[in-house]
Every structure is written in C-alpha cells, then in structure tokens.
Amino acid sequence: MAAVTRGDLVRDLSADGRVIAVNSPTLYAVAGGTVALTVVAGDVVKQGQALAVIDSPELRSRQAQEGSSLAAEAARATTRRTHLFALGNRSRNRRRTEEKSGIAPAASGIQYTMDMGQASDASTYKSYLGNCSSEQPEAG
C-alpha cells in the first residue's frame, strides 16, 4: 500500500461567464449634463474604445471660454514679440547708421538701454539681441 500525503490539487478550468463588480461606486459630476452609453452590458470592447459620451452645456461653455482666453493670450504674445523684434531692428539700424557716421560706440550703448526700458519683456528682448549680433552690448 501507498502512504497518504497532503498536497495541492491542480486542475485547469475553462468557463464562460460575466464579470460583475463586487461593489458599485457612486459617481457624481461637477456640472449637469447627459451621458450616452455607447456600449451595453455584454458587448465586447477594445482598448481605447469610448464607453460613454458626456454632454454638458456648462462644460462646453467653459471650454469655449478657455479657448477664447488662449487665443487672446496667443495674440498678445504675437503682438509683444513683433514689438520686441521691431525694437531690435530699430536698434540695429541705428547702430549701423552710427557706425557709418563715426559716432562713438558708447552712444550706441545708450540707445540699447533706452530700448530695453521700453520693452515689456526684458528676457525676450535680451535673448533676441543676443541672437542678432555677438557685438551688441549686454542688455539689462
């Protein structure tokens, strides 16, 4: 006779069934709206597939408002950049004129200081001047 021993019994099992949540979480929204489910229980879904579409007039309005604010800021940045480039061009043109006419380089440095005082974004102006010519004085 054989001796009896304890051990794990291993069997493979294959079955069809449903996965059901043990507890149902309570969901809430920060804004009112509607939810349209794009799948129903039992549908096969793929990774990345939308399961629901949320439509909220309040959130759509807020998104449009933020989009407008972003466009306004982009326009302001473009205007500032254009202004700074114009200041830099004006300074370079003055420097070239001064060089041709024999005005002392120290006077040219004064103009850079005046343009720097007019600039609203000093760091951008400084980096722009640095890219224009390595001979230009350090702004600021």
Image: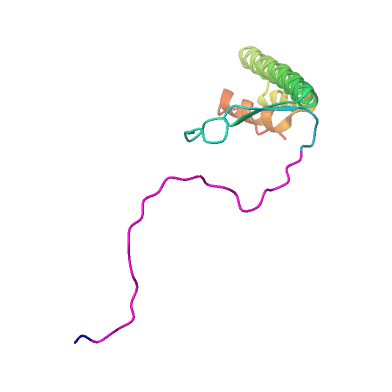
Q: Nearer the viewer, residue 23 or 100?
A: 23
Q: Nearer the viewer, residue 129 or 27?
A: 27
Q: Residue furthest front?
A: 1
Image: magenta residue range: 3-28
Is-magenta flag for residue 6? yes
List x then y, in percent, for residue 101.
65, 12
Q: Residue at x 34, y 73 (%)?
A: 8
Image quarter for residue 50?
top right
On-image quarter of the C terminus: top right
Is-magenta flag for residue 95? no
On-image quarter of the N terminus: bottom left
Q: Residue at x 67, y 23 (%)?
A: 104
List x then y, in percent, for residue 53.
65, 27
User: Vertical placement of 103 versus 39: above or below?
Assistant: above
Q: Residue at x 73, y 31 (%)?
A: 122
Q: Residue at x 62, y 17 (%)?
A: 99
